[in-house]
Amino acid sequence: MNTRGHDQRGSPGFTLIELLVVIAIIAVLAGMLLPTLSRAKEAGRGTVCKNNMRQITLGMLLYADDSSDYLSWPGGVDRNLPADWMYGGQEDTFARTPAQWKSRAYGFHAESGAVFNYVTGQPRVLPYNEGSATTYPIFRCPSSGKLGAAIRVNFSMSSLLDPGERLANRRTVGPKGVATSTVVGPSNKILLVNEDPATMRNASFAPGGTAIAGLFVTHAGRINIGFHDGHLEAFKHKKVMQIQSGPDVQAYFDPYY
């Protein structure tokens, strides 16, 4: 059959306008999906953070079981006593000076703390070496950024559990610290805080101290907090500010209130 004379051309392609419309639609869909994906990713990091804090809280309670019911101590800046849960710390964490973060003496040291072996199953590292830069992921919040990575420990123990700490009504924490059996309302008393790395001078959370200047929005506007009974909750920034002042300090931090 003679097919000459018939049009042998294929179907025409997209016009420039059609391509631009398709690209615009893809851009709109991407703009709608990316925030959702970002929130989902952050929710995953928040879950990892909670799991880390849950394991640390369990380690603290196991330590108490082996220590006549007494909890480890919150400690302070460079106060490296045998019962301190964490060693090391600086008067200034140089939050605005990243060059300082590279110092081997910078940051906090989980490996020498009293609860380390209970949390990780590894032997406690003593004597304490200020120059050690070993990082243990379980002591880190995955959303704490470069400063959190430099500090190496992103969680703080309530400072009102420290021996000699002055509480309300002229009470004072005894020389051995706080026994778990004496904590009033353990489901309401804070044990561990996912603190803002920029306000951490040590791994001890003093309500109304440096933490009052913190920004507690790590996990989609919230941070994780662990309680004496082992459960965890996510608090908004405003709530974290409230629990650091007035009667809320006693309600959330005073072990005997």
Image (spheres, grey):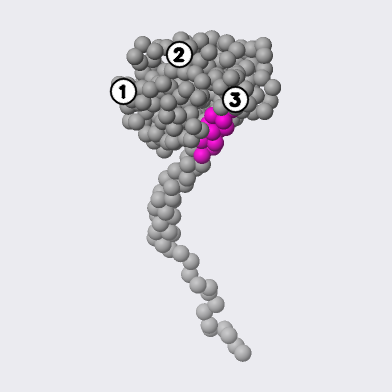
Task: Report the Cα–Cα distance between label 1 and label 2.
Answer: 19 Å
Question: For the magenta stretch, what is the residue range?
Answer: 47-59
Tell me the amino acid under the disc marked 2.
Answer: Val
Q: Considering only order in the chain, which callout, 2 or 1, is on the residue closer to the N terminus?
A: 2
| Prevailing secondary structure class for the magenta stretch in the rendered image | helix
Which residue is located at x 42 percent, y 54 percent?
29
| Residue 34 point in image, percent of width and height | 44, 47
SS for dot 3: helix
Mark 1 and mark 3 in contact? Answer it, CB < 8 Å. Answer: no
Residue 143 is labelled as none
Identify the residue under disc 2.
Answer: 173
Which residue is located at x 52 percent, y 79 percent?
7
SS for dot 2: loop
Identify the residue under disc 1.
Answer: 247
Identify the residue under disc 3.
Answer: 65
Q: Quadrant of the N terminus?
A: bottom right
Q: Considering only order in the chain, which callout, 2 or 3, is on the residue closer to the N terminus?
A: 3
SS for dot 1: helix
Tell me the amino acid under the disc marked 3.
Answer: Asp
Tell me: 94 left or right of 66: left
| Residue 75 point in image, percent of width and height | 51, 14
| Residue 52 point in image, percent of width and height | 55, 33
On screen, 117 above or below 45? above
Which residue is located at x 36 percent, y 26 percent?
251
The answer to which of 51 and 25 lies nearer the viewer is 51
Q: In which quarter of the image is the C terminus?
A: top left
Which residue is located at x 39 percent, y 26 percent?
252
Tell me, yes or no, if residue 89 can be seen here.
Answer: no
Q: Considering only order in the chain, which callout, 3 or 1, is on the residue closer to the N terminus?
A: 3
